[in-house]
Image (cartoon, grey):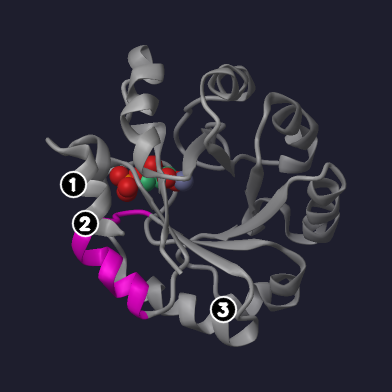
Amino acid sequence: METIISPSILSADFANLEADIKRVEPYVPWLHIDVMDGHFVPNISIGVPVVKSIRKITNLFLDTHLMIENPIKYVDAFVDAGSDLITFHFEATLDKTIETIEKIKSRGVKVGLSIKPKTQVEEIKEYISLVDMILVMTVEPGFGGQKFMEDCAKKIEQIKKINNKVLVQVDGGINDKTAIICKNFGVDSLVAGNYIYSAQDIKKAIESIK
Ligand code: DX5
Ligand code: ZN
């Protein structure tokens, strides 16, 4: 299967967001939207109204990465805004994980579960077969342009061993070289922000991680 590339608009120019989405649109199926609340992560990015505006200008599959506390509270708003996939953090829900998965599924969109670098696959074992995708973070969530943590990449293989049907996405520090490491472990989807949006030739950058 060809790797699903999901460009992260966190590295786009927010004053020219439509133009920056149009630059990647011909070459990718997904668009990665990073939502940060200043509590779960030490940064604030964008929220529901921006997703709603993006939905009006593109048919790309909207891959929404919630780095927020109490994500279940915002599921309806993001689905109504047009998200196609909602990924939330295991560390943000813990005892509400099942409830959050079910809430997202009940709204008819895809569901993803994400783990930070220090969280082990063992901790989320029971949820892997209940979701469409697991997002393995290879940087501490919060900022674009950080260095890829190679140790985390082996989690891809660990997840696939438990369930080879679940999609595995990797987010953080992806470039043409780190993409190969992930591919060798069996990754299905790669998020890239800085590498794509800082490239002179966007098409070439995307092709190089595919
Ligand atoms: C980080 C975000 C990422 C980020 C990736 O918290 O979840 O999606 O935009 O950026 P790069 O590709 O620059 O590491
Ligand atoms: Zn992300």
- Asked whether 179 or 65 is in front, the reply is 179
- Asked whether 91 or 160 is in front, the reply is 160
Q: Residue at x 29, y 56 (%)?
A: 174
Q: Is residue 151 left or right of residue 100?
A: left
180 part of magenta stretch? yes
Say which mark, if any, is on residue 159. 3
Q: How many marks?
A: 3
Q: Is residue 62 left or right of residue 17?
A: right
- Whether the residues at callouts 3 and 1 have beta carbons within 8 Å, the answer is no
Image spot of residue 10 (x, y percent): 39, 33
Find the magenta span and give its range. 172-184
Q: Is residue 87 left or right of residue 130?
A: left
Secondary structure beneath disc 1? helix
Image spot of residue 24 (x, y percent): 34, 35
Q: Which residue is mark 1?
A: 204
Query: Relative to 124, does residue 32 appear above or below in the rendering?
Result: above
Distance Cα–Cα, label 3 vs label 1: 30 Å
Residue 15: image quadrant is top left
Query: Relative to 28, does residue 113 appear above or below in the rendering?
Result: below
Say which mark, if any, is on residue 208. 2
Distance Cα–Cα, label 3 vs label 2: 25 Å
Secondary structure beneath disc 3? helix
N-terminal of the two: label 3 or label 1?
A: 3
Image spot of residue 57 (x, y percent): 52, 19
Q: Residue at x 34, y 14 (%)?
A: 16
- Asked whether 194 or 55 is in front, the reply is 55
104 part of magenta stretch? no
Q: Is residue 119 left or right of residue 19?
A: right
Pointer 2 local density, CA inside 10 Å: few below 14, some 14–19, many at least 20? some
Q: Residue at x 81, y 51 (%)?
A: 105
